[in-house]
Each structure stands twice: as C-alpha cells, then as structure tokens.
Image (cartoon, rainbow, N blue to C red):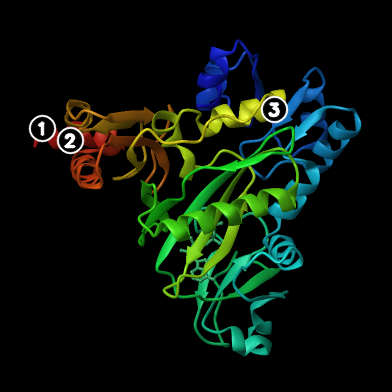
Amino acid sequence: MFIENALRYDVQVNVLDPDPQCPCAQLASRFVQGRFDDLETVLRFAAGAEVVGIEIEHVSTEAMEQLEKQGKTVIPAASVLRTIQDKGLQKEFYRRHGIPSAPFALVESASSIANHAALLPAFLKTRTGGYDGKGVMPVDAAATAVPEGFKGPFVLEKRVAIAKELAVIAVRGADGTSVAYEPVEMVFNPALNLVDTLLAPARCDASIANEAKNLAIRVARAFGSPGIYAVEMFLTPEGELLVNETAPRAHNSGHHTIEACASSQYDQLLRAYMGWPAGDVRMHGMAAMVNLVGEGGTGTPHLAGAKEILRQSGTFIHLYGKHETRTGRKMGHVTVLAPTTAEVDRAVSAVKGHAKVVPASTLKTQSTQ
Ligand SMILES: Nc1ncnc2c1ncn2[C@@H]1O[C@H](COP(=O)(O)OP(=O)(O)O)[C@@H](O)[C@H]1O
Ligand SMILES: [Mg+2]
C-alpha cells in the first residue's frame, strides 16, 4: 500500500523482508530477502538508501542508530523505536511526559503480581514481541498461572473500564508541524482479539474527538521524530481518554485513509520521508474498514463474496497478496465509503455477511457437496 502511493511520485522503494514471497516483493524497485532484526543485514541493505523507514517495530535498533550516524534520514528515529519496542519503556515514557495512561507496574515474573494487588484486576503484557493480542493476558487474582512461553519481564497494567477503543493517527512533518486525522473507533472480535471493524470518524462527541486528536499530537510531539504515530486510546465511561499504546508507523487503523481522505497515511509517511509538507487529513465522508481475517484453516487464499461486495457502491477491496491464509491471519480489508452513518452500517453488514477469506481447497469441497 505504501509502494502503490510512492509510485505516483516516481520514488524508488527498496524492501527488506525475510519472506521472499512477501506481498511487496513484486512491487519493490529492489527486493532483498533477509532479517530486519539482524544488524549486518540491515546495514548492508540500507547502504545505498537516503531514507530508511519501517513497517514493523521488531527491527534492529542498533542498525537504525548506525544508519543515523551515517547521516541517513531514519524514520521513526532509532530512539523512538527503542522506547516503543518495549511496552515497559513506553509506559514510563507516557508517565514522564504527563500523557494519561492506565496505572501500571513493571514486574519480572507472574510471581510478583501479589506485590501489586492494587492493580488487580489487570492485564499482564510481555514487554517485547507482542502484537494483535498475543502477549496480553487478563489477570484476575494474584495467584495466576501463566502459560508456558508467556515470558517476562512484563507490564502489569490495571484493567480500565472501556466505553470505546479509539485510535488517532498523528502526522509529524519534517518541519516539526503536527496534524491528526479524525479519531477512528475500533470494534474488536473478542474471540481473535483482533480489530474486526473500524468506524471513521469514531462515533463520539466532537469535544472528545478534539481531545483525542490533541492527545495524539502531544504523543507525536513527545516522541519528536518526523513520521506517523498511530495512537491507540481507551475512552472510559466517564469520558476520560487514556493512551494504550503507539505504533510509530502505518497502521491498520489508518487503512481507510487511502480512499476516505485527501492524503492517505501512506502518503503522509512518504511526505515525512522526503521532507515534503504534511498532506490534507480531511475526510471525504463517512467510512468504515472491515478486516478480512482468514477462516477455515490453512491454504491458498480465496475471497468468497467478492462479487457481492463489488456490487455495492463505495466499497473497495484490498487483498494483500499473502500466499497462505490461516485462521485469524489478516489477509486484507474492505473499505466502505458512504454519506451517512446508516449507509455505512448497512454496507458493513453486507460486507461482513458476504466476505470470507478461506483456503481455496475448502471451497471446492463445499461446492461438490
Ligand atoms: N489496561 C487495560 N484495560 C482494559 N483493556 C485492556 C488494557 N490493556 C489492553 N486491553 C485490551 O487488550 C487489547 C490488546 O492490548 P494491547 O496492549 O493493545 O496489545 P497489542 O500489542 O496486542 O495490541 C486492547 O486493545 C484492549 O482491548
Ligand atoms: Mg494494541
């Protein structure tokens, strides 16, 4: 999605990824297979580049630091990545900068939960390596058995009441100016702990939307580096906003911006990379985004219901081109644009009713039955 936009400007994009079949391999000007968490591999890959960016946080920060020292533009800055890679450092960062966030303690192992009884009920989060709910576990009592492989150190975070989960993408331009998109509302699939649908703008009071945008801009300013920051927030039933976590990169909660906004999150990222002015964040209308998550096992992906979706005006299918679908894997998304919330809701139900990414093999079995 980043490359699609960059092509408009004739910007050359080179990609490093461990998977030779990764979707962007065919689109990149140059594709290099290799580990982005390996210092030497990253340094070799980026030797000829002017700007270095990321699409995932789990990269070698040491490599990013060295690239900065070589005088390359690194976005986000290596120091930002270091903080965000570790949920413990991230929580301390919010506290240090006066950014509201749920109360927490850093613990080495689950046996220390008893020392922080005031935080219960809580969430235990692995400090590094977690994503999409992997690495997050609810804890109700001090004596909690932690599954094997769920390893500390952890953040123990007080469970807060959530009325809505919001996300705001803040854009920090190379010149230090910051803007924010309208907040979006994330609706989770409780079984998969993945965002199922995203509503844009979030359905909340204008005052809360403004506060959320200001908060995201504060977070972006605190981090300081140019780039884009997807700031996940909890809106409590009392109307308070708490920052949950930040992704310093293009994010699932900004996919709708491709069709719904004048300048997409990918366009903003490119502008930041190139030192160009930030783009226009305004929305054309109401939007929603439905994640297409694999169902029915492993195999070659097939999107069932594509025709029904395409029959609806204002729907846009994005299939990422991953070679294998797995239950719970994000395989693509559908964006819906409509002039009213009622029409958005109708289109979302239609998309959810029809769209399914399943292994192509299960499809054949079904049709012969
Ligand atoms: N302190 C909390 N109180 C209530 N719910 C939480 C809390 N922390 C996390 N959650 C729930 O768990 C989800 C995943 O947690 P998060 O820290 O965002 O992990 P991940 O890195 O997997 O996205 C959140 O989106 C939210 O639904
Ligand atoms: Mg999260």
- Indicate the quadrant where residue 155 lies: bottom right
Q: Is the Cβ of the residue at disc 1 closer than 8 Å to that at disc 2?
A: yes
Neighbour class for label 3 at 10 Å: few (<14), some, many (≥20)? many
Counting residues from the N terminus, which is met first, the one under dot 2 or under dot 3?
3
Tell me if the residue at label 3 has its CB under 8 Å from ligand 2.
no
37 w.r.t. 166: above or below = above
Question: Mark 2 highlights which residue?
Answer: 365
* Separation of residues labelled 2 and 3 (CA atoms): 48 Å
Query: In the image, which is nearer the foreground, mark 3 or mark 1?
Result: 3
Whole-angstrom CA distance, mark 3 to mark 1, is 52 Å
Tag 3's secondary structure? Answer: helix
Image quarter hosting the C terminus:
top left
Give the residue type that dot 2 points to: Thr
Residue 260 locus on image (x, y percent): 39, 33
Query: Which label belongs to residue 368?
Result: 1
Q: Position of residue 360 (x, y in %)?
A: 28, 31
2 or 3: mark nearer the eye: 3
Callout count? 3
Q: Nearer the viewer, residue 166 or 303?
A: 166
In-image side of 210 versus 337 (left or right):
right
Q: Is residue 110 above or below residue 359?
A: below
Q: Is residue 96 above or below residue 59?
A: below
Residue with the mark numbered 3 = 273
Residue 288, image x, y percentages:
33, 42
Query: Amino acid under label 1?
Result: Thr
Inspect this view and state whether residue 360 appears. Answer: no
The crowding category of the residue bearing disc 2, from other C-alpha atoms within 10 Å (few below 14, some 14 to 19, many at least 20), is: few
